[in-house]
Amino acid sequence: MIITEPSWKSLVVETTTPIFTKEQCQLIIAAGQSEPKQQAEVGGSHKGAVDTKTRTSHISWIPFNKMPEMYKAIEQIMLKTNGNHFGFDGMRITEPAQYTEYPSGGFYDWHIDSDINCKHQPPVRKISMTCLLSDESEFEGGGLELMSDGNIVKPKQGQAIFFASFIRHRVIPITKGIRKSLVMWFGGPSFK
């Protein structure tokens, strides 16, 4: 017996048009910059630590009540994207949005966003999203590389990439300027 996934399923989806305008991106940047800034950690909430050999960036967390319209718009896009491409059960926003700044030399080496032990993550992270907030002319480098060397996505300002959280990915080093992005995770019940 051969089991195959439906032909409509995808593990990586790039929005064809921006989900946020330039002005909306600026509002999100301002919201992220107004929150406490911290050095990004690796290893998740259970064993997170600063490791500059793996990740160099600064992050802040945008509270749900600070930008409810942003959260509502992202949730609607995620639900449509999930229905059309992923087909995961019970999907919802599970964590606040992470505003991230990668300075020149900043990067995030190969990693996955879900915990290998799903019991640590009820709900289980199933879909990750990265939305570029910077104008792409404001930095060089910093592409999102998915699954293997050379598979680089370079979205335009306001454009989002949705991908299965268990996919290996990285942000290649910034060579000039600052890359600003919004990162979110969406989860649901354990995989069946």
Image: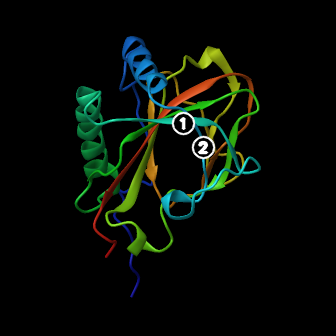
Disc 2, disc 1: CB below 8 Å? yes
Quick one: quadrant of the N terminus?
bottom left
Who is closer to the viewer here, 64 or 8?
64
Residue sitting at x 63%, y 14%? 137
Residue 14 at x, y percent in the picture: 45, 38
Quick one: quadrant of the C terminus?
bottom left
**Is residue 105 placed above or below 123 in the rendered structure?**
above
Residue 176 relative to residue 38: left or right: right
Taking the view exactly as shown, the residue that stands out farthest to the front is 36
- Label 2 is placed on what type of residue? Ala
Q: Which of marks 2 and 1 is nearer the N terminus?
A: 2
Q: Residue 108 carries which label?
A: none
Taking the view exactly as shown, the residue that stands out farthest to the bottom is 1
Residue sitting at x 46%, y 56%? 165
Who is closer to the viewer here, 4 or 147?
147
- Label 1 is placed on what type of residue? Ile
Q: Residue 40 carries which label?
A: 2
Q: Name the residue under label 1.
A: 59
